[in-house]
Amino acid sequence: MRLFIAINFNAETRSRLVTLRDELRSDSTKGRFSAPENLHLTLVFLGECNEKQAASAKAAMDAVEFKPFTINIGSVGRFRRSGGDIWWAGVNDSLQLIILYNKLTKKLTEFGFQIEKRKFSPHITLGREIITKASPRRFKEFGQTIDKIELMKSERIAGKLTYTAIHDTKAYSSP
Ligand code: ATP
Ligand code: MG
């Protein structure tokens, strides 16, 4: 199974992201745009895993402690690609998010995963293979509290890209 660890969003954040996606789409002549239910922030891409590795991923997640924190989304940008760019909503700098990422990758490494060394650049993909007249921009941020991370299975079901949460680890809330 193909796995990744992600932050998923509440209905309000999702709907704001869909608005960003729709604005981008209306400025574009080409692109594959993310389905609303697929909008997410990838923390770590694990790739193809067997049952044992999936169990390790769950254990690694559960060994990470974090408190609820806020993330803010305040920009739209792109990764240049030949044949059409990847466009994303950008997450404003968040020390708590970086700390969570660092704790998670450390645990995953202890559990035998090889994590890519590439710098973590938190983003929410709005679409791929996009040709557009839009420009990267900043806007007044919107945000939400993050209180869990989820292990996601990625698969094609009847041709449709489908993500399913198969495990979650909750932030601890002090009394
Ligand atoms: P598709 O590949 O069908 O266009 P997708 O990229 O959303 O769709 P997956 O390839 O299963 O689906 O990826 C799941 C998540 O992991 C996505 O957020 C994707 O951007 C991210 N991801 C995929 N491959 C990598 C990789 N090699 N390195 C880092 N992140 C990745
Ligand atoms: Mg992919």
Image (cartoon, rainbow, N blue to C red):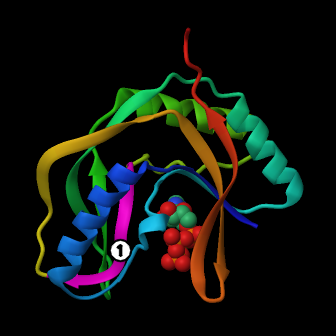
Residue kind at label 1, given as amino acid type: Gly
Q: Position of residue 106 (x, y in %)?
A: 63, 33
Q: Nearer the viewer, residue 90 or 145?
A: 145
The residue where tag 1 is placed is 127
Quadrant for the N terminus, please: bottom right
Please give the name of the residue rendered at 72% of the width and 47% of the height, measured from the top-left corner.
113
Please give the name of the residue rendered at 37% of the width and 28% of the height, measured from the top-left corner.
95
**Residue at the top extreme of this rendering:** 175
Q: Main secondary structure of the magenta part?
A: strand
Please give the name of the residue rendered at 12% of the width and 74% of the height, measured from the top-left corner.
134
Q: Nearer the viewer, residue 52 or 158?
A: 158
Q: Nearer the viewer, residue 54 or 38?
A: 38
Q: Position of residue 50 (x, y in %)?
A: 84, 61
Q: Is residue 11 above or below residue 169?
A: below
Q: Which residues are magenta?
A: 122-132
To which quarter of the image does residue 135 belong? bottom left
Q: Position of residue 18 (x, y in %)?
A: 31, 65
Quadrant for the C terminus, please: top right
Left or right: where does residue 144 sit relative to residue 27?
right
Local secondary structure at mark 1: strand
Q: Is residue 158 magenta?
A: no
The total of numbered circles placed on residues is: 1
